[in-house]
Amino acid sequence: MSLPTVKTTCPYCGVGCGIEATVEDPAAHRVTIKGDPDHPSNFGKLCSKGATLGDTVTLENRLLYPSVDGRRCDWDTALDHVAGRFRQIIAKHGPDAVAFYVSGQLLTEDYYVANKLMKGFIGSANIDTNSRLCMSSAVVGYKRAFGADTVPCSYADLELAELIVLVGSNAAWCHPIAFQRIRKAKDNNPNLKVVVVDPRRTASCDIADLHLPLKPGMDALLFNGLLCHLQRDGRIDKDYVANFTNGFAEALHQAETSAGSVAAVAAGCELDPADVGQFFAWFAGTERTVTVYSQGINQSSSGSDKCNAIINCHLASGRLGKPGMGPFSFTGQPNAMGGREVGGLANMLAAHMDLDNPAHVDRVGRFWHSERVADKPGLKAVEMFEAIGDGRVKAVWIMATNPVVSMPDADRVKQALQRCELVVVSDCIANTDTAQLAHVLLPATGWSEKDGTVTNLERRISRQRPLFAASGEARHDWWIISRVAQRMGFADAFAYQSSAEIFREHAALSAFENDSEHQLRDFDLSAFATIGQTEFDSLQPVQWPVTRERPQGSPQLFGDKQFFTADRKARFIPVAPQGPRNKVDADYPFTLNTGRLRDQWHTMTRTGLAAKLNAHRPEPFVEIHPADAERLQLKNRSLARIESRWGQMLARVEIGAGQRRGSLFVPMHWTGQVSSHGRMGALVNPVVDPYSGQPESKQTPVRISAWPATWYATILARQPLAIRDCEYQVKIRGEQFYRYELAGSDAGKDWRQWSRELFSENGIAGAGDWLEYSDLQAGYYRCAYLAGNRLQACLLVGPDFELPEPGWLCSLFPKPELSRSERLALLSGQPPKGEADIGRIVCSCFNVGEKTIQQAVQAQKLQSVAAISACLGAGSGCGSCVAELKEFLPQPG
Ligand SMILES: Nc1nc2c(c(=O)[nH]1)N[C@H]1C(S)=C(S)[C@@H](COP(=O)(O)OP(=O)(O)OC[C@H]3O[C@@H](n4cnc5c(=O)[nH]c(N)nc54)[C@H](O)[C@@H]3O)O[C@H]1N2
Ligand SMILES: Nc1nc2c(c(=O)[nH]1)N[C@H]1C(S)=C(S)[C@@H](COP(=O)(O)OP(=O)(O)OC[C@H]3O[C@@H](n4cnc5c(=O)[nH]c(N)nc54)[C@H](O)[C@@H]3O)O[C@H]1N2
Ligand code: SF4
Ligand SMILES: [Mo]
């Protein structure tokens, strides 16, 4: 009998890949994941994260039951408690004393209901989302230029382009399948050029014809310079500018004051003038140009202006609304776009209507049958947590986001929640840094159980469909919110029984009075305004607007050169370039850049469950330029302390020439759950963009110094351990083992006693064999414990950071038994002669390590990635490691 296959959508990045999931065993949550060959986002491909989804649907660490004040309770008790406390606080202090902090990882239906409850019925706009930290500046950029939050491009434009400029986007790691489409387009069209603008040399530079490692924060100067160049070079589309836009002269004038020459731009951006000239010449000479921008642009105290500096260049050259061109903001989360549609941000209403427009407020009020619709913007994320901290907001409900890790100045956020009267957290995972501070925990269904829609970065709506029944007592987010709403007295407006019903209402609102008689809005799902359950269940991926005239959706917008401003013309925005708000100085001489790794998703609550995904970069690290490392005597693999005015962290030093001098890069993923000092949000400057309220997460002034550890240790154990008395600690989940990297600055630990106690407290003891090596004078100690012939645990201690790379030891845990020679080799940490040590994992699909690749390249004289793939498989799965594989090949010259 063939097993049922469900078509659904990946819950990670905004690329929105289609998945075919075959449920092998519903009780054991066993499922096989494949790319959906028919889905127009990915045509069957998946990256490393999507491909390992099957490893993350485990019940381990799931939040399965509601609880209030730490005590498990039933749903009625929890819902009554939340509704009752919210009502009390609102009655006493008014609706602005409560807040929701939600997420671009909610489904559209969840998001719609949360927004409707807060803005429509509680009557406050205090609902903001983690998208504030993500693409709120991109929203401002589009709204200012087009009069609506319209992403004008599609993936197809990337394939038709002849120049793609990636600005502040590491798409190779963050939007891998879109990046692979660009790579393939480049293979098919040798004329397609790629320019990467990023202070850091990233994996995306692998396909770049030109990399501009500009001074952090200087992008507006670069694009103002480009606008001036287009003018000098006679590339302004005069007809387009005159007939379809406003404000060109002012924008050009402003650009000319700072960026009137290539030399001035190159000096201000600290770039080679020849490279700047090359970029300008390519842009000027290439009609089909797409500019992709992401967090290197948005996460800035002047991010909105940076977005407009980019859009200005497209408007000036008329490169918009035609195939193969446009300013393309890449959103990050699976449903960041859905959040924009329902009005998840505190300054938006719903269905692309505005809070500060009385006609919109009136219209939404009539549609929702509510007279209480909020008519002024609410608190944006950073302000919201300030208000929680100083007691203005007394109750907050956090859904599908982990602000104790991901907010800037995260220690303040933590304190604010500790002081808050009522913290409600809905999550599918039990142990998160934020869940630990909750008074009420509400278990949400996870990706494999959810049912609804998401919108990807090219406006494509796709279905997420359930693979399993809800685990434990978990409920859909929309169910939880609407049941609280009912108990708050809004039963009629929240009587939802299904996600289809909510989607239908959302579509109907988008169509409500959306015609030229009122004022046209871009977001229009009128074709779905009466959609039924069956049609919803079989909904095919489609790009909005979806109307009766365009039932197949709309891949390209603005082809008619009509925008959503009052006079239907696009607007240029004059931009005065600014660097980071807080500059580096003698106390804090480095710029801290933060961002993403290939195989982790944000705060690791789900990717951290997949052993395969933890192998690529197992520990928090700080990347630093070799010259800076040498000057500060920071050694590769040693530990360093990084401090800002707001907080500090510890991380492993990685020296890399891809870093600019004066810049540091730290990944954003590590939390208090898996590391003692890796939560980088504590350092990040909470300063925000004045228009969007988006924080400057990429340019915090910091300092770095060596952290003087006196000992370093690695522990591998078959089960998780509770480790006391240890300053530095990182926990990594592996295949049938847990790995701990430890360090301390205390002296004279009795390692033998310490390890015996640790292991026995954690249940690793008995009649098995202890192997031991001890040279305590010199600071070395190693031991291993075997039960039968299986490795249960081992500890390696040394006085410095040069402990053996544990790849081989890790590979022993899945083995049913060890050979004689393996036992003998155990304490050396190195494989017995003749057996290979694969080293750090590079290809997570096929588990291929760096040592294996080095050996194969040398021994077989491999000359290309294709040859490595043919020989080892590496790179032939999801393709995410292709850029790294290239580094193993012999370098030309
Ligand atoms: N693997 C993985 N993929 C993800 C995610 C994840 O957690 N893991 N998260 C998703 C989400 S929500 C998002 S928002 C996206 C983010 O996707 P991206 O924006 O591509 O990712 P980031 O790593 O945050 O930052 C992008 C780049 O900005 C650069 N940068 C820093 N400062 C500047 C600057 O001043 N100018 C310029 N031009 N560049 C600068 C950084 O060096 C970095 O390489 O990724 C999505 N995809
Ligand atoms: N310094 C710095 N900070 C940053 C960034 C940066 O680049 N640098 N990037 C920012 C950006 S772009 C983003 S998007 C944020 C991301 O930051 P967060 O949103 O805080 O990160 P996640 O780990 O994705 O958190 C999602 C939470 O929702 C839970 N969850 C997953 N699915 C569901 C569901 O269906 N229902 C419910 N109720 N819960 C669910 C997960 O278990 C997890 O706890 O971080 C921002 N912070
Ligand atoms: S690129 Fe990867 S993470 Fe993004 S949607 Fe596709 S499979 Fe998921
Ligand atoms: Mo994001």
Image (cartoon, grey):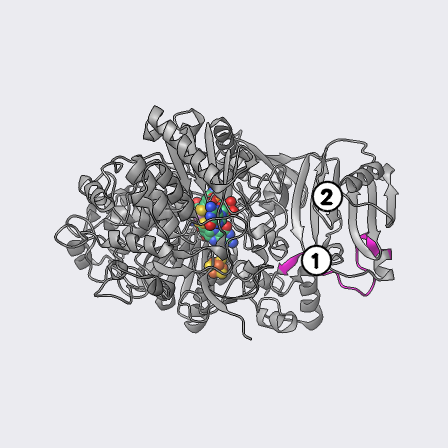
- Of marks 1 and 2, which one's residue comes earlier in the chain? 2
Q: Is residue 509 left or right of residue 586?
A: left
Name the residue nearer the viewer: 801 or 374.
374
Residue 559 visible, this angle: yes
Left or right position of 589 against 345? right
* Residue 814 on image: x %, y %: 73, 59
Q: Is residue 116 left or right of residue 74?
A: left
Residue 839 image label: 1
Asked if one can make out residue 456 in the rendered structure from this viewpoint, the answer is no
Residue 233 appears at what percent x and percent y? 27, 57
Q: Residue at x 41, y 51 (%)?
A: 294
Q: Quadrant of the N terminus?
A: bottom right
Q: Which residues are magenta?
A: 824-842
Q: Nearer the viewer, residue 400 or 810?
A: 400
Please tell me how many numbered marks the rendered image carries.
Answer: 2
On the rendered image, what quadrant is the C terminus found in? bottom right
Amino acid marked by disc 1: Gly
**Which residue is farthest left?**
517
C-alpha span from label 1 to label 2: 17 Å
Q: Residues within 10 Å of mark 2 (few under 14, many from 20)?
A: some
- Pointer 2: what residue? 801
Give how far across and how far down residue 77 sits, in percent. Answer: 47, 37
Q: Amino acid at mark 2?
A: Phe
Q: Residues within 10 Å of mark 1 (few under 14, many from 20)?
A: some
